[in-house]
Image (spheres, rainbow, N blue to C red):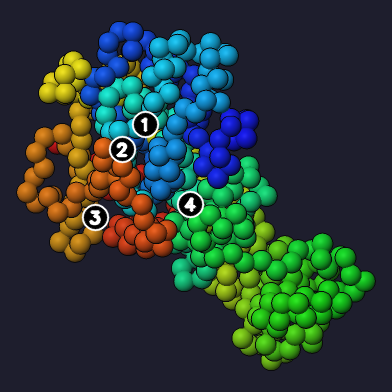
């Protein structure tokens, strides 16, 4: 269903239906029971990191803030709920005036996290908080998975730039979110124009094999591209014979040719051969860009190759084997009554099967060793120890329904680089392992 179907402005779509049916049936039942107004605390966390991963990356927070702000039950949405008899009339009346008026605290976007980290804390009435579960989780689970994969790839690439180019390998809207998350994780640009338009991410692109195949000769294709885009363009050289293409590319563009792109074959071997050939032809400043189903392991294997940049698609936008972060949104505390002065009572699921959780409204801090390197994620519900006061992680994102925590994406990106840099060096190892620092509960 698109925004036009809902009778909403196209540029400000409602996020109210990005929720599960049972959120609304819980709301209806709580309204009837008189418990809907009880002050409640929900927290987002993951019980474990994806197998083999040593840290997670918080991404999507900015998108969550937008989603909460746009969580509105307009007439079209209410009409849908009424026609399907999803909730009764009193609940529809309550939803018609819904505006989240609570508080949200969370890890700043770009920060790293570990099992149990209270990545987001949502506080308000049970009714207003419970509705946000699905939209919050759908954003954070997706974006954090992509950012974590991007971070590993960025670490493997070192100082070499990474281009996100996975739009054609995922849903068109997920592609935009993936570009944003990849930028948070360390990528430098994207091929997706919607991501560039919406988030200001630098965009790049030149040509595909189809452009070469369109022309009668490869030389004609190169000539047309150089005339249109200048000598600093990147020419794709593996449509036919790579060595012949490189020779033709330099003849057409001269030694000022910006770059050549290799999209197939044994990239390690071909890159060495192409570098040697370019140097022999006098194009010593021409860079080499490699693409072709790369992931962090392939990038690491090319560390000694004369490669100047990587383009990554499928493996990135699918989380490099882990497309979700397995985060959950759980009620951890609630008031004994609807009285605003009623004390909060810790609550938690205690069933068997590995899905237990820790009750209580939590704080989190990261303890550092004598060298300033992270050594533990410390989580508690009581007073914060004096030595951890300055190391607390949660920041205020929404207060009384008003968004406070919006930040430029470059700030988020720089924060992640700094957070990753403060982890033990083993965090960047690509071999499977446990979380690089333990989680301690006080």
Please give the name of the residue rendered at 13% of the width and 20% of the height, measured from the top-left corner.
342
Q: Nearer the viewer, mark 2 or mark 3?
A: 2
Tag shown at residue 181: 4
Q: CA distance from mark 4 to mark 1?
A: 27 Å
Q: CA distance from mark 2 to mark 1?
A: 7 Å
Is the residue under label 1 in contact with that under label 2 (CB below 8 Å)? yes
Mark closest to the chain's N terminus, 3 or 4: 4
Which residue is the site of mark 3? 374
Q: CA distance from mark 3 to mark 4?
A: 24 Å
- Residue 161 placement, left or right of 48: right
Secondary structure of the residue carrying tag 1 is loop
Residue 121 seen from this side = no
Which residue is the site of mark 1? 99
Mark closest to the chain's N terminus, 2 or 3: 3
Mark closest to the chain's N terminus, 2 or 4: 4
Q: CA distance from mark 2 to mark 3?
A: 33 Å
Secondary structure of the residue carrying tag 3 is strand
Q: CA distance from mark 2 to mark 4?
A: 25 Å
Which residue is the site of mark 2? 401
Mark closest to the chain's N terminus, 4 or 1: 1
Secondary structure of the residue carrying tag 2 is loop
Q: Residues within 10 Å of mark 4 (few under 14, many from 20)?
A: many
Q: Nearer the viewer, mark 1 or mark 3?
A: 1
Please give the name of the residue rendered at 32% of the width and 49% of the height, measured from the top-left corner.
405
């Amino acid at each position: 269903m698109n925004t036009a179907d809902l009778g909403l402005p196209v540029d400000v779509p409602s996020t109210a239906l990005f929720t599960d049916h049972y959120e609304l049936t819980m709301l209806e039942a709580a309204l009837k029971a008189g418990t809907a107004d009880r002050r409640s605390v929900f927290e987002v966390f993951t019980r474990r990191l994806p197998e083999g991963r040593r840290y997670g990356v918080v991404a999507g927070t900015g998108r969550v803030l937008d989603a909460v702000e746009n969580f509105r039950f307009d007439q079209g949405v209410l009409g849908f709920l009424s026609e399907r008899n999803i909730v009764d009339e009193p609940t529809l009346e309550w939803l018609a005036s819904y505006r989240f008026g609570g508080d949200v605290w969370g890890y700043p976007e770009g920060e790293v996290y570990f099992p149990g980290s209270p990545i987001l804390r949502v506080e308000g009435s049970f009714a207003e908080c419970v509705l946000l579960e699905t939209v919050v989780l759908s954003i954070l689970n997706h974006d954090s998975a992509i950012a974590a994969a991007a971070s590993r790839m960025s670490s493997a690439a070192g100082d070499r730039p990474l281009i996100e180019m996975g739009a054609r390998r995922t849903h068109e809207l997920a592609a935009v979110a993936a570009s944003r998350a990849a930028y948070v994780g360390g990528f430098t640009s994207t091929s997706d124009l919607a991501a560039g338009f919406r988030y200001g991410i630098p965009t790049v692109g030149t040509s595909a094999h189809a452009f070469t195949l369109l022309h009668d000769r490869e030389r004609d294709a190169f000539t047309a591209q150089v005339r249109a885009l200048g000598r600093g363009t990147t020419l794709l050289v593996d449509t036919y014979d790579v060595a012949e293409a490189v020779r033709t590319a330099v003849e057409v563009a001269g030694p000022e040719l910006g770059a050549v792109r290799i999209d197939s074959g044994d990239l390690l071997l071909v890159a060495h051969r192409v570098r040697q050939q370019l140097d022999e032809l006098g194009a010593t400043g021409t860079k080499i860009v490699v693409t072709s189903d790369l992931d962090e392991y392939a990038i690491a294997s090319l560390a000694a190759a004369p490669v100047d940049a990587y383009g990554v698609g499928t493996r990135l936008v699918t989380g490099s084997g882990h497309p979700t972060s397995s985060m959950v949104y759980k009620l951890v505390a609630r008031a004994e009554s609807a009285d605003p002065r009623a004390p909060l009572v810790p609550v938690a699921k205690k069933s068997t099967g590995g899905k237990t959780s820790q009750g209580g409204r939590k704080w989190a801090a990261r303890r550092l060793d004598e060298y300033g390197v992270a050594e533990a994620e410390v989580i508690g519900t009581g007073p914060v120890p004096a030595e951890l006061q300055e190391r607390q992680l949660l920041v205020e994102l929404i207060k009384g329904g008003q968004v406070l925590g919006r930040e430029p994406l470059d700030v988020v990106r720089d924060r992640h680089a700094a957070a990753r840099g403060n982890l033990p060096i083993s965090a960047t190892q690509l071999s499977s392992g446990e979380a690089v620092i333990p989680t301690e509960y006080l």
